[in-house]
Amino acid sequence: MCDEINSSCPPVTPPWEPPQVIPAQIRRVDNLIFRKINQFHRENEVEDVTPMHEWILSYLFWHRDEPVYQRDIEREFSITRSTVTNILQLMERKGYIERQSVPQDARLKQLVLTEKGACIHEKTMQSLHQTDEFVESLLTPEENAELLRLLNKLRKGLQ
């Protein structure tokens, strides 16, 4: 193909190892970390919880002392009303949350974490902590500090 376009193209030989470009390596490590999270999720019996359900459960857990409504979830996660409606309906069917009427406005429904939802949140957090501890154990304390420093520098530079 290259010869057809430009006869001066050098022949391409496939590399024996993947290139060591930073984005590709970060993506590979990210994939491996998610596999480890999924392993701990299976061990903690929460493998069927989606990441979005985890985030919403966590949000409800950390805001349990204040009223939370659908619009709060829409704003917090930058997702549309129809998407949030579908997600919350599924979470309600699974027993993770309840929608409770608000006395001052019958149209408003407060989102409340159920006991089952709190338990699921606790188990998913356990999986995340186990993953964090596992990954942290692969490096020295100094390497962990340097990795976090560099990742934060990259994140800030890419924003």
Image (cartoon, rainbow, N blue to C red):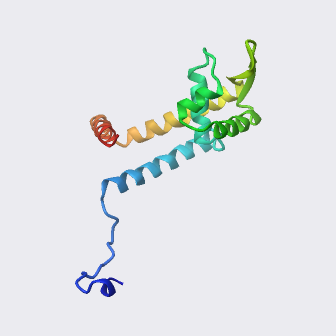
* Displayed quadrant of residue 111: top right
Q: How many marks?
A: 0
Q: Residue at x 61, y 30 (%)?
A: 57
Location of residue 56 in the rendering, given as x and y in whole percent from the top left corner: 60, 32
Q: Quadrant of the N terminus?
A: bottom left
Q: Quadrant of the C terminus?
A: top left
Query: Could you say which is closer to the camera, residue 158 or residue 117?
Result: 158
Query: Could you say which is closer to the camera, residue 60 or residue 34?
Result: 60
Vertical placement of 50 versus 102: above or below?
Answer: below
Q: Residue at x 27, y 82 (%)?
A: 11
Vertical placement of 127 versus 32: above or below?
Answer: above
* Displayed quadrant of residue 104: top right
Q: Residue at x 63, y 44 (%)?
A: 47
Furthest toward the top, the residue is 104
Location of residue 141 in the rendering, given as x and y in whole percent from the top left corner: 30, 34
Camera sees residue 121: yes
Side of 120 where 25 appears, left or right = left
Location of residue 46 in the rendering, given as x and y in whole percent from the top left corner: 64, 39
Furthest toward the left, the residue is 8
Camera sees residue 122: no
Query: Could you say which is closer to the camera, residue 159 or residue 39?
Result: 159
